[in-house]
Amino acid sequence: MLNDRKKVYDFPHKAIRYGISKLVQEAGRTDYSDPKDVLQLLELGKEIFLMLKIHARDEEGVSLKHLEKKDPQTSLKDKEEHKYLEEKIEELEFLLDRIKEEGEQAQSISEEFYIKLIRFQTDYFSHMTREEEETQIRLHLYFSDAELDEHQKEIMSSLGGDELKIWAKYLIPNVPTPIKNRFEEMLKTFS
């Protein structure tokens, strides 16, 4: 039964959902005339966008790479969506930079940023849902749980210390204790 199988997207997607939601919340509550508030938002945005780039890099470099060896066509939709989402990330990063440059005059840019961030959240969450419903099934079709564990180890061992800290920051507060404990144990093996 597929529900009993390893869910390779469980950890990263929980962290991503939490991180993007937090960014949306902060973008909505930020006082754009307050440089300190704006700086906090910029730092959060930089961190979340980095986490998303790391996830796409690792997914394409490991999970999708292995999947392509079994069926070259199976990763096309994922890669197409990653490219689209990367373009949206670049657009959001550009808007954040403009907000920083404009200072107290950033109100109109901040409104554009917020609207585009909401659309991005919807697009990214839809992408993750499709991966969990479609790509996950293909991974289960072609790989055993032991092989999927090896893929996860390959990803974890490729992460730098700062990258692991970002994942921990957004995963650990967002999961029940058993999952938190599993992730912390996994972190120990890669520290």
Image (spheres, grey):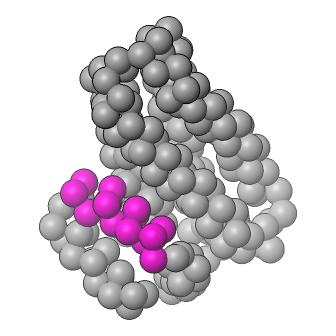
Between 33 and 43, the one nearer to me in the picture: 33
Q: Position of residue 66 (x, y in %)?
A: 71, 74
Q: Main secondary structure of the magenta part?
A: helix
Res. 23 image quadrant: top left
Q: Position of residue 184 (x, y in %)?
A: 27, 78
Q: Position of residue 108 (x, y in %)?
A: 50, 9
Res. 89 image quadrant: top right
- Magenta stretch encompasses residue 182: no
- Magenta stretch encompasses residue 172: yes
Residue 166 visible in the displayed image: yes
* Image quadrant where one finds the N terminus: bottom left
Q: Residue at x 53, y 84 (%)?
A: 157
Q: Which residues are magenta?
A: 161-174
Residue 23 visible in the displayed image: no
Q: Residue at x 31, y 74 (%)?
A: 183
Between 63 and 161, the one nearer to me in the picture: 161
* Image quadrant where one finds the C terminus: bottom left
